[in-house]
Image (spheres, rainbow, N blue to C red):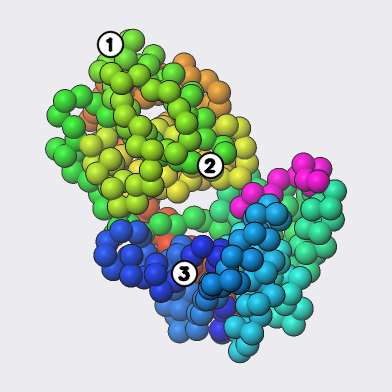
Amino acid sequence: MHVHVELPEELDVESYRLRNARGEIPDHTPYGLHHIGDDGDVVTFRRPARGALAYVSRKVRNRLDGYEAVTAVTGAPQRRGADAILCMDERTGVPALFTSPRRPVVTGIGWLERPDMLPPAERRATTRALRRCAGMFSQSPGVVPILREHWGVDPERVHGVTLGIDPEFYPEQPWDGRDPGGVTVTSVGDDRNRDHPTLIAAVEQVRAGGIPAWLELATTIPVTLAPDAGVVHARRMNAAMRGLYQRSTVVAIALRSNPVGAGLTVALEGLASGRPVVATDNPGMDHYVDHGRTGLLVPPDDPAAMAAAIGELLADPERAAAMGAEGRKDVESRFTSAHMARELATIVRNAL
């Protein structure tokens, strides 16, 4: 089987490999998709546009809410010889479905919710595209029933896929590497579903209760954090996240209520690092964070509940360490990029 992967335009596989070799980013290819070839299948990746074409493509993409129409057309010759096309989200998948009538397309769904939440023209185009789709998948269990019940597609073509990460890039961190000056709560995230104000309010409540919590928050979203309560890293951290996880006692992820799987990657990074995770209990989060065993799940928009969960673990470091160890075991046995790639390969093979 020859699978041709169409990645987002900003991802250049060759540059990605170089950065991985320098220890800057996880996996040898984006999402670890080279693992699709672990059993002998052929995997190729779309080459990004260059020069003037890249400029035009970026302008068009910005006007189409991220959908990558230009490279779907100009990249069509690169599909020759492929048995199927794989896209990781609908912004590449929908254009591929319109420009590849002769090859099955399997696409991930990263952001779609109900059709009535889209403008009419986008809703019609997306509906037409998805009905052509040989298979679609989501890493969030909360999205799968939405696709099956609201988009008019064959339910048999909709699959749940378990998200995976690179456990070698995110090793289990020793507990004696934590910040000796206090107990650190780590969080990271830039997407629209992050609820950093709830997290900051929770940490402030923990501190008011007498626990000297210190928040390290990596985000480019503007937030207000008191200087004596923590630090905001307003940049992409990449490999430096491993230092944050090492210093931490708890990884905390506050999210707005949504079904699309926001925060799952950070949750897995925390678990891989051997740290318990406190997270908003959105649909699908419990597939990754086992409440009471590898972390604690709390309701959305509830600083008091998040403060109680964080404080509970900060006050009992032995329990936190035990949860972190269980989380690391889960990542190694279920949540690696190699596991995810095998699931994707099965979906593509069944779509042929």
N-terminal of the pair, mark 1 or mark 3, is 3
Residue occupying the point 70% across, 80% down: 103
Residue 341, given in percent of the width and then of the height, sits at 48, 67
Which residue is located at x 39 percent, y 67 percent?
16
Q: Decide: marks 2, 1 in contact (CB < 8 A)?
A: no
- Give the residue number, with chain letter if any, for mark 3: 12
Q: Is residue 97 visible?
A: yes
Neighbours of disc 2 within 10 Å: few (<14), some (14-19), many (20+): few
Q: Point out the tag, 2 or 3, that comes first from the N-terminus.
A: 3
Q: What residue did someone put label 2 on?
A: 191
- Residue 288 lies, with reference to residue 43, above or below; the image says above
**Where does the magenta region start and end?**
108-119
Task: Tell me which corner region of the image, top left, top right, bottom left or bottom right, holds residue 256.
Answer: top right
Q: CA distance from mark 1 to mark 3?
A: 48 Å
Amino acid type at circle 1 is Gly
Crowding around mark 3 (Cα neighbors within 10 Å: few <14, some 14 to 19, many 20+) is: some
Near-viewer residue (318 or 179): 179
Amino acid type, label 2: Asp
Q: Secondary structure at mark 2?
A: loop
Quarter of the figure with the N terminus: bottom right
Q: Which mark is residue 210?
A: 1
